[in-house]
Structures are given as structure tokens and as C-alpha cells.
Image (cartoon, helix red, strand yellow):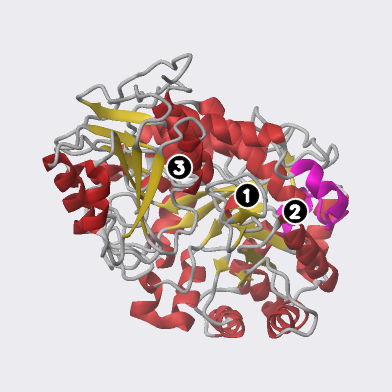
Amino acid sequence: MTVQATGWCRAVRAGFGSLLIAALSGCASQSTSVEDSGSLEANWTRATLSRMSVREKAAQMVWPTIWGDYVSDDATQWVRVRQYITQEKVGGFTISIGSPVEIAVKLNAMQRMSDLPLLFGADLEFGTGYRAHGGYFFPGGYDLGGAVLFPPQMAVGASRDTALAYAQGRVTALEGRAIGLHVAYAPVLDVNNNPANPVINTRSYGEDPRLVAALGGAFIRGAQDNGMIATGKHFPGHGDTEINSHLALPVVDVSRQRLDSLELVPFRAAIKSGVGAVMSFHGSMPALDASGDPGTLSGRVLKGLLREELRFDGMIISDAMDMRGVLDRYGAREAAIRAVDAGADILIQPVDVALTIDAVVAGVTSGRYSEERLDRSVSRILAAKERLGLVRERFVAIDSVRAIVGDSTHVASARAVAERSITLVRDSLSLIPLKVPPNARVLSITFARRSDLTAGATFDAELRAVLKGVRSEYVNADSPTNLEAVLRAADSAQVTIVSSYVSHAWYATSVAAPRAFADLVTDLSARGRKPIVVAFGNPYLLQQIPSAPAYVVAWGGFPISQRATARALLGAAAITGRLPITIPSLAAFGAGIRRSAISAVR
């Protein structure tokens, strides 16, 4: 396997030594042949592979998912983790939620159990804080702190700034590596050109493939320049779907010409940027494979298009193997065999770890593919471990976590994304920034699902710091029973703000807000309340409330975006965002009313 040189590789700094990290599809200071190299790492990869059994090779390709939470030594969950490592000998894990220090301690303990270094991946689309956060303590809603949480990618799209995308990749890598993570399942390279997409939505940079390519490439460079493998997903493209692949098999029935001009543009650019991994799409594209198989199980997609045509030689990671998009037609065992036969190197989140390893082995013993086929995948996985320096040092320094994770400069990067992303789509009555005295009666209505415990808290607190007459009302999106009381409260308010936190969800079938939301905004308008609507979730909500006089898109409901939005409404920060999407028939791509910051709020 030859690793080609690219021009953007840099020595890893900020606490990780001077090891030169090489992205698997090609980041190195000079062109290097693994087979011909005399380095310790190359010898280790070759020697390690040569002494592995077929089942040990298969196990390197199967990565269970575990939480990063605290568990005792004899807890059932920890006993299971120990079994995965010491008996099944898996090659890595996908890590989910936990506090930064607890994740670091847990991953060190797991590394200590394993004969070979483990690779740890995580879904870090919104920064390391998306997984590594201490949570909130209730009652009281106290934020227990954690890694930096960025707004969704579409917020970066609204800024149009590749420097911000690079900064997000950099911060994600530094904080992720500090707690023991190695592979970011990010960035999302799907082009969200379908407003009805229930699962991508604001996870995408936008609907323009060139914008997605530019911002995605910047994130990749930021992550891989700083020691983390980036993963472009979901190949060949999940943007033009109305079916959630967690629940069923989506079909993108467009021509190959359309795929070349839209869906594949960001992936081609990512490969040129040296992206180290690509995650597959659990969806069918008849133009690429007439069989109807999802991309994860299609040799025409993974081997034919990604490997041979696009010449990608990094790691191919499946999307979660417990999703209905791959399970419904073939079941867990056959899906695993077909994914490996198609070209996948790593199968994440399997339904059953032992069954999946056995299935990969059965593919060899039954003649579906050869042991040499496994060797190619395992070589890539071992090469990743060696280039990340795990052969020499697999543990992280617990005492260094607080010096890196949540650093104020990292927080500033996320704050810049949030502030630069706020987009004023409509303001027909010139309501923004607010022009009211500090004692004005302001009604802030939070429309959110009960599970969203932080919705509105930071936004209202930031408003209340300037406007002492802010009154907060909450409407449960799943059971909106208090609408009449909210309308009565609005009758005595000088300013009414309605904030929707309803967005895409992993198991949602629609991104539309409940009908009650549209009815509430319509009724407020009919009563002359001139509502200011803020979309903290789905940015396409304007379609349901086309008569709203003021419409602001904040892209995500995380506290950092709530704060940025409140500051924008108060005039404490400029509004400069532009839509990276089209809101059909209502707002064009690139739309956005600019507002300057004002020196004081009267």
C-alpha cells in the first residue's frame, strides 16, 4: 500500500508530540511505501498481520458501540466490554456519550486490556462536545461542562467561511485526541437539496455541492492536520431522500449525470483533500446498482465507484449496521457478509458482535471472498493505528485533559460560528434589532419537545440580562395543551418571540413542526402581535408560516446558538448569515438581511 504525499500535512502539536500524522488516503511528508519502509511501524503492521488468525482479522473489522459513562468494574456493561476486547478481540469501538475525563479514563482502561492498540471513533459532527459532555443536573439545569459543542454544519454553511470550518476540524481533533478518540465520523458531505429530508437537514453544509465541498475539505484538513482521521459521509450521498435510513431503505432515483454534478462533488473533493475514511450510505441508487442494494452492501458502489473510479484507498466505514436500511432485506448475518464483500473495511454498531465476527469469517470459509480480501481491510486498520502513534503510546494523559478540552480559544471558535451563522430571512416590519426600553414586556415562547431540557434556557436568560420584563412560556410540541393561555399572555406583551426547537431526529419520519406551531404563529398574527419567529431547529419552517413578519434562522438549539441569537436580536452583535439552502417559493439560496450591531439597546 503506497501513501501519496499531499501538501497540507503538518506535525501534530498541542500536547501530542511531533509525530507526523498521515491520513490513510494519503497524508505524509513525502511519498512512502509501507511495504518497502524499514520503519518500526511498517514492520509492526506486516508482522502483526502475519500472525493473526482469520477470526482475529475479522474481529479487527467489527466495532461495537459503547457509552463513555462511568461503570463499576463488575457492572454488566463493563463485563461485556471486557469480553469484546479479551475474548472477541475487536479492533476498535464507536464511543458515545460521557464526560471528557470519564471517557479518557475508560478508554485508557480499555487500551490496557487489549493485546493490540484499539481505534476509537465517535460521531463528532458538532465537535467533541457532541459526545463528551458532563450533561446537566436537574433540578436547576446546571451545566456540568465538557468539550466544545459547535452549531450544526449548516450554520457554518450560512457563514460561507472555510476558516471557520477548518477551525472546527482543528478543535474537534485536539479535544478528541486529548480524551483518546482517533476517528471523527465527520464531516457530513451530503448535499441537502431536499427540504423534506428527515435525517440530514442541518447536519449538511447546504444545498450547493461546491459550498459543501469547500467547507467539508476545510474541516478535513483542520482535523487531519491536528492528528485525527476525518470521515466523509454518507457515500455516495444521503441528501436527496425523504426516507430515514434508520427506519427503512431510502432510494435516490436520479441519473448518473446528476450524481456526478451534485452528490459526488463533495466526495471527490474530500478524496483530493486526503480524507482518511469514508462512511457508506444505507440507501439505494439505481443509477449505480440496479439490484436495489444499499450502497453499504454494493460492490458496484464501494469497490467499483469509490475504490476504482475515485481511487480512494483509505478506510471504508459502514454506517451503523443495526439500521433498517441494511437489516430489512438481508438480516444481520447476511448484511455483514455482503458489506465486506462489497468493500467495507469496518462494520460499526453491529446488532450482535460475535455473530458479526462469525459472519465475516463465514464469508471466507464459504468462498464468498478470500482471506486476502480481509488482509486488505486489516492492513488499513493496522496502518491507521501505527500512523496515529498507538504502537508507541496508546494512552492519553488524564492530567492534560483539562488543559485542552473546553479551552477558551476553542470556545471562541464555536462562538464565532454561532454568531456568524445567524440569518435574518425576513423582517418586513423592521422589528430586528429590538427597539424597546429595558422594562418592555417581552413574551418569549419556547416550542420544543419535552426531552429537549435546555430549550430556551440560555436564550431567555440572555434576553433577560438586558430586558427585565421578559416572560417565558413553554409549549410542549408533543402535547400543546396550553395554547390559549399563551395567546392571552401575548395580548399584553409589547414584543412576542416564538422559538421552535423542533428539528430532524435520528428516528424521525418528518422534519415539519406539529400543526399546533403553525396555528400558534397564525393566531398571534391575527391578534396583531407581530411575532418574531426563530428557527432553532428545522430552517424550512417558514413554509408552514409564510405570513410571519420576521423570521430568523439560528440553525441549532445548543446553548451557544441560543446566546448568539439573543445577542443578534438585542443588537449586541451584527447579523450577517446567508441561507446555504433554498426555502421553496419563499427565500432564495443566499438570502439574508444584514443588520449592524448597535451600541446600546434602548
**Residue beneath disc 1:** 128
Q: Which residues are magenta?
A: 382-404
Q: Does 94 appear above or below 512?
A: below
Local crowd size for mark 2, using a 10 Å CA cut-off: few (<14), some (14–19), many (≥20): many
Local crowd size for mark 1, using a 10 Å CA cut-off: few (<14), some (14–19), many (≥20): many
Q: How many marks?
A: 3
Label 2 sits on a secondary structure element that is loop
Q: Does 144 appear above or below 187?
A: below
Residue at (64% x, 55% y) in the render? 133
Residue 475 in the image: state x and y as whole percent: 32, 57
Q: Earlier in the sequence, mark 2 or mark 3?
A: 2
Identify the disc placed on residue 460: 3
Local crowd size for mark 3, using a 10 Å CA cut-off: few (<14), some (14–19), many (≥20): many
Residue at (26% x, 65% y) in the render? 481
Residue at (52% x, 63% y) in the render? 344
Q: Describe residue 336's horizontal placement relative to residue 16 as left or right.
A: left
Which amino acid does the dot numbered 2 rest on?
Ile
